[in-house]
Amino acid sequence: MPKIKYTTKELKRPDRFREFLAESLESLSEYFNKILIGIGIIVVALLGICFVSSQQEEKDLLANEQFRKAVESYNSGEMETSLSQLQTLREEHSGTEVSVLALYQIGMINYQLGNFEEAIKHLELFLDEDPKDGIFRDGANVVIGLSAFKLERWDKSIEYLSEIDRGTSPYYVQARRHLSLVYEKTGEPGKAEEIRKETSSETGL
């Protein structure tokens, strides 16, 4: 059997398989590191989302509790206390859904207290939030209209009272009656009478 002879150069040359294996392991190591970094980023992002969600949930719970207390104060006849509690809620939890409802309640309480400018201010902020509930929206419009009426700001009163043009709204009759009164005040009795007739025919009153 003939002997296999190797030159010194060939003996020093790394085995091709071992070369390939080393290169493969090196590439795999780099790829694996990239995967780990990617997974790490995703995990950190998920933890961040969970933390924010948890924080928001806690914030919502605190805001809801504050609103409940404000409603209790209002129902007990303590309107000034309720107003203060609602304003605190707005300051501390402005990003929550219930803080939007607090704007509505603040406007309504201010109207009852005779603070018509404040009522208009807060109810307009409430409407700026684009509330989806038609009852709350109509309530805000009619109270802004009534507040403007009290302040003898006839154009503003007409603008907001005219927003309630659906016979199905519980505020419809009140809005139309005051709208006719506004036209009486502005020296337009013809318009006032027309609105009264329309309202009577639509509601049967």
Image: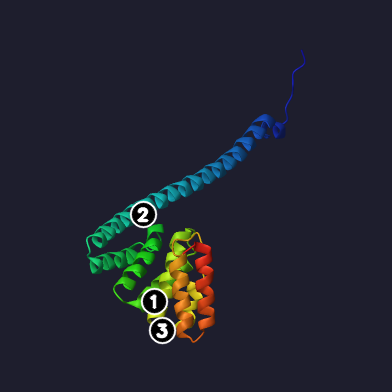
Position in image of residue 131 (x %, y %) = 47, 61
Name the residue type under label 1.
Answer: Ser
Of 101 and 160, nearer the camera is: 160
Left or right of 29? Residue 48 is left
Are the residues tagged 1 and 3 within 8 Å (C-beta)? no
Position in image of residue 108 (x %, y %) = 35, 68
Query: Sequence order check: which comes first, mark 2 or mark 3?
Result: 2
Residue bearing mark 1? 147
* Residue 166 appears in the picture as rendered: no
Query: Sequence order check: which comes first, mark 2 or mark 1?
Result: 2
Report the coloring of the rendering: rainbow
Name the residue type under label 3.
Answer: Glu
Disc 2 is placed on an element classified as helix
Q: Residue furthest bottom?
A: 187
Residue bearing mark 2? 60
Disc 1 is placed on an element classified as helix
Position in image of residue 63 (x %, y %) = 33, 57
Mark-to-mark CA distance, 1 and 3:
9 Å
